[in-house]
Image (cartoon, rainbow, N blue to C red):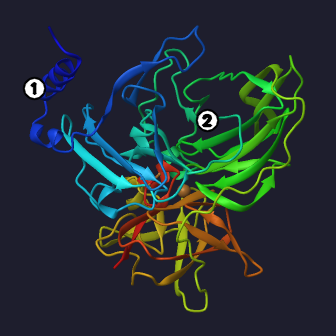
Amino acid sequence: MTTRRGFLLGATGALAMAGLPGGARSQSGGFPVLQARQASAQLAPSSYPKTDIWGYDGLIPGPALRVRQGGRVQRSFHNGLQQASSVHWHGIRIDNAMDGVPGLTQEAVPPGATFDYDFVAPDAGTYWYHAHNRSVEQVARGLYGALIVEEAAGPDIDREETLILDDWRLNPETAQIDPDFTSFHDLSHAGRLGNLITTNGQHDLSVGVRKNERLRLRLINAANAKIFALALSGFEGWTVALDGMPLETPEPVSDVVLLGPGQRADLIVDVTAEDGETAYLLRAENEQVFSQAAFPVGGVAAAARRPAPDALPPNPNMQFPDLAEAERLRLNMEGGAMGRLDAAILDGNRKTFRQLADSRQFWAFNGTVGMTDTPLAEIARGRAVRLEIVNDTVFPHAMHLHGMHFREVLEDGTFGPLRDTLLTFRGERREIAFVADNPGDWLFHCHMLSHAASGMMTWLRVT
Ligand code: C2O
Ligand code: CU
């Protein structure tokens, strides 16, 4: 007779024999497995075939990982793909060795091999994980999922929904993913924009609710390049957190919520639509409005609505940077179509724009394209940094800093909310500041993944 435990061990053994050259490695932590593999999903309407995807545990989105604040996330990542991969835990103030950046914090995990991720999640909030090797392809094929870090005492809500937004570029006949991940046009313009928009892998997600119910919506933009402009209908809502971090004061959602690639927003929403009506998360696009997710109302939860929500509890050890003492850095973003970059340094050599284009590189930071052996800056641990970012291109960019959150320094000298990704538009000059309190090598790159693949990537070293 096979006991349940025996069966599970047997299954693991079979997996190891099926092709884990580093089999010993997979046994090391004994952590639950998170496997990247090929699968298929019904992304397009049912009259279309299923789409071949790459998913964690074969799912779109990957399994939602949940941990209590201060707890450990432990996963044995198994690469079941034909391509090397790694997992990045976006927005976590993580131990650098677990950040999942090939060539900077670890080697890419070869096909068939495993890597144990094991880290503390110090901050409550909405985070996500995604592939960080050839992200322009791997994230576009579906390698992402939610990472939820729960507050010890969460807000007063009836329930929560995690909504991961994506856009896919599918062949309009076969519904298969367009495999041209590095077309000149995408790399040099606004990035890879899709033709099918999904929420949690569904083009027509519908979630039943009741009138006066209070929900927490955890919104995550996993798209390669799309900026979502979202609005509510049939709800009254408040933004309570951005990029995982609580706002000091919840902000009523009166207009659109903009979500650049990589960004998150937590909304607390009350269903105000009547029984039998439908509330919506809406998406504005080209002056039209679409349903991003529908919330049909069936029944009434309570006679009366609650008062406006309180702020979420703040996360620990978030100091305000001392601007007067801060080290000043500058990042000039140049290039792209209709840009003014006529030459830049690539791999230590000066190249003309034509030569750069031949290498499929179109963007530069401070006159240099892509990753370099030396960091943009080396910063002493605990030092405050203020970083001026000039978007001298005609495209928007979503600049993501690994390992630490920052605040925008606003025109009037006050600070904006904590964020890990800053959405900048053409011609803008913005400034962010943070305390460099997390030691290690941290990427700073555009989360329009086509841009990251074609030059918009640099790093900082905190020692
Ligand atoms: Cu979400 Cu370097 O990425
Ligand atoms: Cu960009």
Query: For mark 2, what is the residue?
Result: 163
Q: Is 368 in front, or is 160?
A: 160
Amino acid at dot 1: Met
The answer to whether residue 179 is above or below residue 220 is above
Q: Is mark 2 within 8 Å of ligand 1?
A: no
Amino acid at dot 2: Leu
What residue sits 53% from the left and 51% below the top? 448
**Could you tell me if residue 133 is visible in this image?**
no
The answer to whether residue 367 is above or below residue 185 is below
- Residue most extreme to the bottom: 324
Q: Is 171 in front, or is 403?
A: 403
* The quarter of the displayed image where residue 389 is located: bottom right
Q: Is 11 in front, or is 450?
A: 11
Crowd tier of the residue under label 1, counting other residues whose Cα lies within 10 Å: few below 14, some 14–19, many 20 or above = few
Q: Position of residue 186 (x, y in %)?
A: 52, 45
Q: Secondary structure at mark 1?
A: helix
Q: Position of residue 197 (x, y in %)?
A: 62, 30
The answer to whether residue 402 is above or below residue 319 is above
Q: Position of residue 311 (x, y in %)?
A: 72, 57
As drawn, is 148 to the left or to the right of 283? Answer: left
- Residue 314: mark: none
Instruction: Tell me the distance, in whole angstroms, between the alpha carbons under discs 2 and 1.
Output: 37 Å
Query: For mark 1, what is the residue?
Result: 17
As drawn, is 123 to the left or to the right of 235? Answer: left
Q: Position of residue 121 (x, y in %)?
A: 44, 55
What residue sits 74% from the left and 25% below the top? 294
Crowd tier of the residue under label 2, counting other residues whose Cα lies within 10 Å: few below 14, some 14–19, many 20 or above = many
Q: Secondary structure at mark 2?
A: strand
